[in-house]
Image (tube, grey):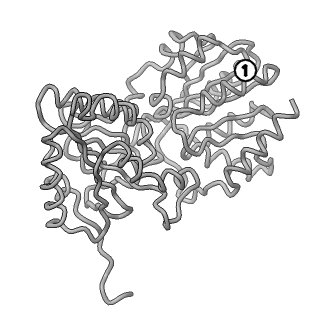
Amino acid sequence: MGLFPERNGMDVKQFTEILGADFYSGVPDSQLKALCNYLMDKYGTDPKHHVIAANEGNCVALGAGYHLATGAVPVIYMQNSGEGNIINPVASLLNDNVYGIPMIFVVGWRGEPGVHDEPQHVYQGMVTVKLLEDMDIESFIIDKETGVDELKKVMEGFRSKLSAGKQVAFVVRKGALSTDVKVEYKNTNRMLREEIIEHITKFSGEDPIISTTGKASRELFEIRERNGEGHGKDFLTVGSMGHSLSIALGVALNKPGVKVWCVDGDGATLMHMGSLAVTGNICPGNLVHVVINNGAHETVGGMPTVASSVDLCAVAKGCGYRNVTSVSEPDSLDKALKEAKEASSLSFIEVKCAIGARDDLGRPTTTAAENKKNFMDNLRKY
């Protein structure tokens, strides 16, 4: 133990008081867990103060509407991977060459250079600050050593930029914010995601699977390890949240004789829901889209999505999916998977899922490049 104990970071309540905002919108991030829990404890999902949106661009537009209606400055929080989703509305809506709408961004810095992280965060971490600069957003990096007085001084300087219709950002390093607030996220569903994925692998057999980012891909990887099956059948979409369905569609269209399975999550489905309309319009008969719905952004902490109150099956039907069902028990799941396996038209299965995963859940031990090669090699067999 060192002479001076490690600091726990700034209390998030002090951080929000310095920002002085009354409206927050964001997509949850594990790096910002203290802020997320604090907002859930203080506001819940009261839409006048806190909206957990489908994607980060959605957050920016909400914030713009809030400013137009109130004249006040909103706060938009996100993982740095969400910067890509804000580029268009920042450049073509917020920028002072257009409407000049002020906004405060709070960005969790995953993949910071010199800090070990998962492969999907490495390049994003390298360009995090540069992307903000390219969007003409001045930023300040918060770490465990950042004090209240220092942050107040920075915010005073930022206010002149905000009053001029510009945007500013706080880039948050790991552990920079802290809170004693504890929030329990749960639902009444009974099946766990890993159990659901085990059922999917049983019925998919030798068929290729494209799995969404987060714990779903990690659990699929470990299921294959336990079964000694290898990993060539699976493409693990470890980043690029919301795009696994489009990847699966691209595979299905070019391998028409193969049943292709997409294992998706509710947060990912909401993030780029337009992909359901495109998929349903093309309607490939060899694609099965399974959405595991626990109504939560579980991989990054458990904050709720709106999927628990959305009829995803009605959405899928409206988009043109032929075989659509929702299940919540193992027997009905097996029935739906069997029917989808045998079907000759586009299938959609929503599986109601509990929140929770094994504490000892690991991460893929193969690299992204190895995963790509093994998956492509396996597809060449068809």
Q: Residue at x 17, y 31 (%)?
A: 67
- Whole-percent x, y for residue 210 in the image: 66, 35
Count the labels in the image: 1
Residue 301 visible at all: no
Q: Where's the N terminus, which quadrant?
A: bottom left
Callout 1 secondary element: helix
Q: Which residue is mark 1?
A: 253
- Residues 250 and 7: in front is 250
Q: Residue at x 88, y 34 (%)?
A: 381
Q: Is residue 346 left or right of residue 268?
A: right
- Residues 341 and 139: in front is 139
- Whole-percent x, y for residue 73 in the image: 16, 39
Answer with the quarter of the image where residue 214 lies.
top right
Q: Taking 237 as reference, is 94 above or below it?
A: above
Answer with the quarter of the image where residue 83 lies.
top left
Q: Residue at x 72, y 23 (%)?
A: 252
Residue 26 visible at all: yes
